[in-house]
Amino acid sequence: MIVAALRVASLVTLLGCMAVPVLARKPATGFLDRTLTLNGSIYKYQVFLPENWSSKQKWPIILFLHGAGERGSDGLLQTEVGMPSAVRKDRSRFPAIIVMPQCKLDRWWTELEMQAVALTSLARAAKEFNGDSKRTYLTGLSMGGYGSWAIAEKNPGKFAAVVPICGGIVEPKAVLEKHPERAKTSYPDEAKSYAEIAKRLGKTPIWIFHGEADPIVPVAGSRKMYEALKAAGGNVRYTEYPDVGHDSWDKAYAEPELIAWMLAKSL
């Protein structure tokens, strides 16, 4: 009996030891810290993986650009507002990889260097986590909404869908007065500007969101971009929230249709 008991105990111990590597191989999911070095500067970014993520298949991948209030170098602030906040409320709504780079404190997503940070983060995450190049999406809010327009029009054919929220292509007057250097990357508020960008975007599916009472980024910019895209035969939707201010992203990312609409698009 003693010998038999020892054998059973040894078998249980062996099975326990064998189970450890199996469990260790289960990939980490949720919000993951990542770092990249670009032009001598270190940037921290986050990648969200759904709980059922597996390397055995390709995954839709979303690039999310935060607003001016989340700029910095901690690699965390950008996860507290917008799409990342919506993910935390209900992860099951987001069966996709989400890449969340962070813009430097004194910089803007419309600058080429910061766009390079965003696109490099996206490329690194796509390679590491098996992102699908045919199902790659772009969205952003406020400063990130401006960044979404800027990156989309400079990279036509890269994104299967684009969702700019309370952004635009013309910097608000208050921003230009405070940061006159921003005029270098801001388009003039002319019909020609909207028409040129609409032409570059072509048939890329775009869903624009804006609050009608936005006191920071004038809603007129989104309205003009919507009309220009329609006139150019673009694939565009526009949602304007009555009596909603600048934080229209809360309602936008809570839209029941939005994620399903986005992930149904493919190049």
Image (cartoon, rainbow, N blue to C red):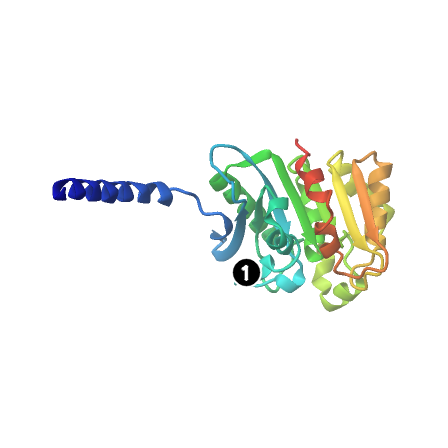
Q: Amino acid at mark 1?
A: Leu
- SS of the residue at dot 1? loop
Q: Residue at x 24, y 45 (%)?
A: 13
Residue found at the very far front of the displayed protein:
1
* Residue 193 location (% of width, % of height): 81, 46
Q: 22 or 192, which is in the foreground? A: 22
Q: 244 or 113, which is in the foreground? A: 244
- The quadrant of the picture occupied by the N terminus is top left
Residue found at the very far left of the displayed protein:
3
Binning the other alpha carbons within 10 Å of mark 1 as few (below 14), some (14 to 19) or many (20 upward) gives some
In the image, taking residue 189 as reference, residue 90 lies left or right, namely: left
Q: 139 or 91, which is in the foreground? A: 91
Quadrant housing residue 108: bottom right
* Residue 129 location (% of width, % of height): 49, 40
In the image, taking residue 187 as reference, residue 104 lies left or right, namely: left
Q: Residue at x 71, y 38 (%)?
A: 261
- Which residue is under mark 1? 76
- The quadrant of the picture occupied by the C terminus is top right
Q: Residue at x 60, y 45 (%)?
A: 92
* Residue 101 location (% of width, % of height): 57, 53
Q: 90 or 117, which is in the foreground? A: 90
Q: Does the image show residue 164?
A: yes
Q: Count of labels shown?
A: 1
* Residue 52 location (% of width, % of height): 51, 41
Residue 237 vertical placement versus 78 (above, below): above
Quadrant housing residue 88: bottom right
Q: Does the image show residue 147?
A: no
